[in-house]
Image: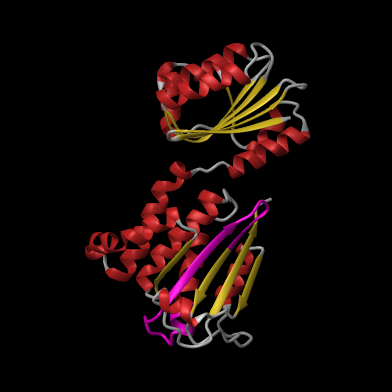
Amino acid sequence: MEEKYLKYERMEVICIYHYEKGLMGLIFAGSMDTDPIMMFQREFFNQIWMPKYYNYIVDMENVNFISSSGLGFIMMLEDSKKDYLLISKLPVDIKDAFELLGIMEWLTFYESVEEIKEKVSIDDEFFERFKRAKEKLTPMEAHLSSMVKRTVKILAEYVGEENVITELDKMQEYFDMIKSSNEIIIPAQRKFTSVVYQFLFQAICVEAGITSIKESHIEMVARELMTNAINHGYGGKEIGKVRLQRFLGKNELVIYFVDYGRGFTAPKKGHHGRGLALMRKIFDEVNIGIPKINEEELKKLGITPYGKGAVVELIKRRY
């Protein structure tokens, strides 16, 4: 069984194919516009495709645009299939394009990944590989709009809707840094919860491709981390800074959130601490500790320590 990850401008594809069993899975995300589809087809036809040899399972759940060339590619799969072509439930705009071409009635669709096994007899190993591939394919464009809306919503709560545009402009350097660096240092201010949210989104959804954590859960974690740092670390004052780091391994994602305040005090039983309990339901491990403080390094980074500090370690296994 072979697996290929292919990335083009605005489009990603994972192709899984089992030559001996004549079975192929294609998972698309992003824009199936003419240029990326044409580039993909050149590689597909030269290295992978064989007419009337494969049965196909095609996932298009995270596609946000399809051109006539993209539709033509799907019809080519239908014409060259061995026995069947199964296609995932389509986003509304993509379904409209299929209906406009009048090809919906010719094709077979499935509502969920689990339904595939109800429609066709499929190898268990291939099925599990297909599910894992779908989970790890970056659905960036599919989720981008809702992520931006949630960022704006969080920021508006702290600065007021009338000030959102001005604040977004001031904070743009931090948002840009999230995409280019695995570490970011930000002021310990409530409005910067929006930056924490985007940092966590980048780590969890974009880079690790974890789909089991909802965006609402990411928002909750961002709020808990910043609120705890301000209230417990800095005595309720918006002073000091916090540091976020992310490390993506083959099997797990590790995120660190560090404040340089007074330090962590375990909440009394039955009083507070619910945020920590909720985070432990979202992540596989949540650990609280004391960061190693190098005063010379902190001075260079413009960080003033107000105590022994606290570090929250969040671990999420990918499989």
Residue 239, percent from left and from top = 37, 82
Residue 126, percent from left and from top = 73, 33
Up/down of 282 relative to 27, above or below: below
Position of 274 compared to 241: left or right?
Answer: right
Residue under the image location 63 percent in, 39 percent down: 133
Residue under the image location 26 percent in, 59 percent down: 169
Magenta range: 228-254
Up/down of 242 relative to 47, above or below: below
Residue under the image location 58 percent in, 74 percent down: 276
Up/down of 149 relative to 287, above or below: above
Position of 284 compared to 275: left or right?
Answer: right
Q: Quadrant of residue 240?
A: bottom left
Up/down of 124 relative to 158, above or below: above
Asked if the magenta segment contains residue 241, the reply would be yes
Residue under the image location 41 percent in, 19 percent down: 68
Q: Quadrant of residue 197?
A: bottom left
